[in-house]
Each structure stands twice: as C-alpha cells, then as structure tokens.
Image (cartoon, rainbow, N blue to C red):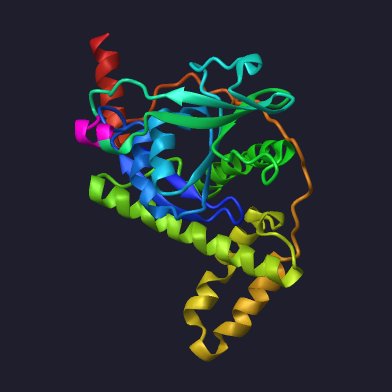
Amino acid sequence: MRIEVLTALGSGAVLAYAVAPYKGKQTGEVTLFRQLVEQLKAGDIVLGDAIFENYFLLALLQIGDIDAVCEKNGARHVDFRQCDQKLGKKDGLIHLRKPARPDWMNPEYYNQWVPDELTIRVIKSKKRIIVTTLLDAEKYPRSSIVSLYLARWHIELDLRSIKSLMKMDVLRCKTPEMVRKEITVHLLVYNLIRALMARAATELKNQPREISFKSAQETVQEFHVLLLQTESALLPKVVKHMIRIASEHIVGNRPGRSEPRAVKRRPKPYKRLQHTRSQARRLNVYQRKAA
C-alpha cells in the first residue's frame, strides 16, 4: 500500500493524505498528489522533490494560483546561457512548450486547461538546480528560494517521525478498510502531538520545529490515562502541565544537515516467520523428515 501525506512546513502537521495500492495504475506519487491538490488554497507554496517538477502538475497548480518550489527533474536540460530572461547569476526564466497529451489525460482537459506555454524560474545552488513558479526576483530573492528548498529536509524528518517514532512502518490490520482506519488513527495522534508542540512553542515564543517531537510524544503517552480519567473542569490544568513539560526540550540548530540514505543495522540471514509458531514447528519437523 502506498501512502502520500501533505504536511505543513511550519508545524509539521498532516493536512491531508491519500492511499493507493502498492502497485498498478494510478498509484504513483504524482497521481496521489493530484488527489491532494484540492486541499491547497490560493497563495500556498508546494515544496517537493524532483518528481513533482512536471509540466502538467505545475499547470494544475497554476490554475489554483498555487506556486511550487522543486528540484529540477533529471530529464530536463537547463542551460543558463540560453535563459529567455536572466535575473542574475545562475538565475533566470525559461519558457516551456506544452508537451504532447499523455494517454491518461482527458483530451478536453488537455485542450482547455493546460496552457500552451509555461514560464518557470531556474536557480542554481551549490549542489542542485531548483525550479520554481515564484518568478519575481525582487519579491522572492534567489537566496530565499534556496533557503526554502533546503528546509525541505524537515519533510523527511516528518516522514521519519510518522513511520519510525509512531511505529507506522508496520501496519497490523488485515483488511483494506481496517488498514485505512489504522492509518487515520496514527495520523490523528501524530497531529495531536504536533498540536502540543505548537502550544509549547507559543508559550516560549519559538517555532514549533524547535520543540522535540520525541519529547512531546512521550509526554502524550505518559498523560493519556490521566487525560481519560480527569474531570473536564480540571483538563486545562493537566494540558498546561503537559505544555510546560514539552517546552523543556528544545531541538538544537542543525543548518544544512545532510545524512546518507543507508540502513546502519544489517538484516539477519533468517527467513521471515510467516506462520504461527506452532505451525512453523510442524512445518520444520515435516521438512526435516522429508529431507
């Protein structure tokens, strides 16, 4: 099963999510993102990786007056010497021509809503080329665009928190309906933790990103029984105490952090247990006798 979440960069809260089968048609990241576009509002900025740098997707966002900041797609060649309009060093505007209609796209939508030309802005940073629809160089300086894209690392940390800290990397329900409910509950609790972090940051006059997610999660776990048993009149005091505890744990400043995409612990060379232990014992005895 594939899951795609739309998170807020400022707080890390999940705004919406889409679920699809693990493989097959209409299960890719861009397809799932199209289901989430309606959750965005005019003036929003979508921050994504290279897979979202797509002509038709950028055109779709343009319809809703939504901007995007993405890394350049590997299939697109950019020559800053041939920009249609230069805005500065390694900064310029490029006019893209409308590609041929893909098979999955409705001809009526293609002819009516996809523009014949799309203007994008390309910016070269130290390690990558960034593509954006924020075209005004005075309002959106090159350094601000680069800084915004570097903040995309927070999205990777959010996904790590959802999968690892929230133990959502392994779903235990057996039917599609129950799996969707399990995902919904996980994300609901995740947003509850993010709300506690936001309240703690407000008390300290800091940003929610400066509060430790792990600390806030442990605070919710320690107080959940007390929250269920406390009378409604006393709940504000309990919540205030939770906020104070969460605000004591501040995350250090780690600008420009980069980590290798690698697993430290190696898997053990054993087969996976795919039966109950009693069945596995009987199968093991049978296999030994057959040998």
Mainly helix, strand or loop, the magenta region? helix
Residue 251: x and y in percent read: 74, 52
Nearer to us in this view, 260 or 28: 28
Q: Which image quarter is the N terminus in?
A: top left
Judge whether residue 163 can be spotted in this image.
Answer: no
Going 59% across and 83% down the picture, which residue do you hit?
Answer: 236
Going 56% across and 42% down the picture, which residue do you hit?
Answer: 160
> Does the magenta run of residues contain 107?
yes
Residue 193: x and y in percent read: 56, 61
The stretch of residues the image draws in magenta is 105-111
275 sits left or right of 224 in the view: left
Residue 219: x and y in percent read: 62, 65
Q: Which residue in the rendered view is the most extreme toward the bottom? A: 233
Going 52% across and 18% down the picture, which residue do you hit?
Answer: 74
211 sits left or right of 20 in the view: right
> Does the magenta run of residues contain 131?
no
The correct choice, above or below, for 109 with respect to 179 in the image is: above
The correct choice, above or below, for 56 with respect to 4 in the image is: above
The correct choice, above or below, for 121 with respect to 285 in the image is: below
The correct choice, above or below, for 96 with respect to 150 in the image is: above
Q: Which residue in the rendered view is the most extreme toward the front? A: 85
